[in-house]
Image (spheres, rainbow, N blue to C red):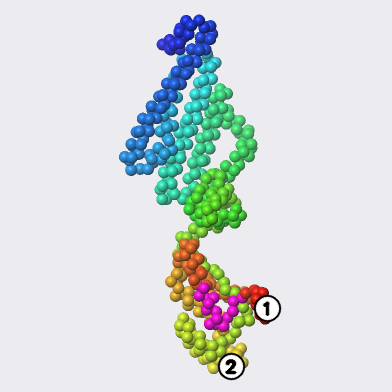
Amino acid sequence: MIERFGRLFHDYLLNTGLNKDLVDYFNSALLFVLVVLLAWILDWIIWKILRSLSVRLARKTKSNFDNFLVANRVPRALAHVIPLFLLFEFFPIVFFDFNYANGIALKSLYILGVILILSIAKRILSSVKDYLKTLSHLRDKPLDSYIQVLMIFAWLGGILTIFAIVTDTTVWKFFTALGAASAVILLIFKDSILGFVASIQVSINDMVRIGDWITFEKYGADGDVIEINLATVKVQNFDKTITTIPTYAMISDSFKNWRGMQNSGGRRIKRSIIIRQKSIRFLTEKDIKELKKIQLITNYLNTRSVQINKYNELHEINKQVTINGRNLTNIGVFRKYIETYLEQHSAINKKMTLMTRQLSPTPQGIPLEIYAFSADKRWENYEYVIADIFDHLLASLDYFDLEVFELPTSFETLKN
C-alpha cells in the first residue's frame, strides 16, 4: 500500500517518455505538493471548527480564561497539530525512493514540532498571565517576569532539542557541554539572570507593584509603574513619558515608593515661610490688645497674658525694660495662630502629626515650617490645600507685624 501510494504518479510520468531518474524526482515532488496541500486544507478546516467551538464556548462560560485563550489564538496554534501528524505519516511515502531526503524532511518536521509546542506553550502562558491580571489580589504582581522566566527555560529546552535533532545526538550531551560553557552563558544571560533574581526579590519583599507611584531620581522616573518584567520596569511619568528602569536596579539602587503615603490617612505637607529676622520683636500691651481681636487666638492670648503677668509680678520683674521677665513675641503668637488655624482646617487630618516649628536661622531669615498631613491625597487637591493654607498665612503676616524674606528688587533699590 505504501509503495503503491509512493508511486502514485510514477507510471503516468513514465509513459510520457521521461527519464526514469527524472520520473522518481517528479513523482516525489508532485506527492510532496499534494501532501502539503492536503495538510494545508486540513489545517484550515480544523482551524475553522476549533474557532467556532472556542467562540461558542467562550460566550457560554462565566470564566474569562477561555476568552483569553481565543484572544491569544491558542485554537489557531492547536489546529496545526493534526496536519503535522499527517505530514509525519506521509513524508516517508513521499520520499520512498530517497532515504537521505526522507531523513532531512523528518528532521525538519521534528524541528517544526518543537517550534509548534513552544508556540502553543507561549500562547497558553500569555492567556494565563492575562487571566491572572484580572484577579484583584494578583493584578499588581510582576506576572510578566514569571512568564518570561518560564519561556526562557522552554526556549532553552527547545533549542537544545533542535540541536539534538540536527546533530543526531542526545540532549544530555548538550547539558554536559553547557557545564563547560557556563561562564560564557552567564555572561550572555547576565541581565536576564539579574532581572530574574531581582523580580523574585521585588515580589517577595513587596518592594514595588504595578500601579505604585515611585520616584527614581537616578533614571529620572516619577510616576506610576505600568509594567514589571524580567529585564525592565516601565514607569509612566506624570508628563505621560515612559521611563524604562532595569529590574535589578530596584534592589541595587535607592528609590522612593509612595504607596505608604497612598495607603495612609494623609499626604504630608512640609513647607516653610522664611520670616525676616528684623521684623521679630516683643509684643506690647497695646499689640496684645489688638491681636485679641483675632478670634482664633483670643483665648490663647487671654490665658497666656494672665500667666505671664502672674509670673512677672511674683518675681518682681522690672518691666520698664521689655526684655526682662517673660514676654510674648509676634513670631511666637503667629506660630500659635498657625497651629490653631490648621487644627480647624477641614482638609487637614487631625489624627496625624500636626505642628508648626521654628527651624535653625539661615542667612535669609527664620524658617517657620508647617508640618501636617492633607486628608486628600490626590495630587491636584493636595496642591490646592497647600496653596489655600499658605495664601492665608502669607496674607496674615501683616497682622503680626512680621515680614517674609525676599531678595531686594531693582524697584526697591531705586526707591530707597
Q: In percent of the image, x 53 and y 47: which residue is there?
A: 199
- Residue 65's x, y, as percent? 39, 41
| Residue that mark 1 sits on | 414
Give the prevailing secondary structure in the magenta stretch: helix
Q: Real-space Cα distance between discs 2 and 1?
A: 41 Å
Instruction: Report helix, strand or loop for mark 1.
Output: helix
- Is residue 374 rendered magenta in the image? no
Q: Amino acid at mark 2?
A: Lys
| Residue that mark 2 sits on | 319
Q: Is residue 173 above or below residue 16?
A: below
Sequence order check: which comes first, mark 2 or mark 1? 2
Quarter of the figure with the C terminus = bottom right
Q: Is residue 66 above or below residue 392?
A: above
Residue 4 in sight: yes
How many neighbours does mark 1 have within 10 angstroms: few (below 14), some (14-19), or many (20 or more)? few
Instruction: Find the magenta span and give its range.
Output: 391-405
- Residue 159's x, y, as percent? 55, 31
Q: Amino acid at mark 1?
A: Leu
Q: How many marks?
A: 2
Q: Nearer the viewer, mark 2 or mark 1?
A: 1
- Is residue 403 rendered magenta in the image? yes
Q: Is residue 242 above or below residue 19?
A: below
Q: In percent of the image, x 67 and y 74: which residue is there?
A: 410
147 relative to 358 in the view: left or right: left
For residue 233, the mark is none
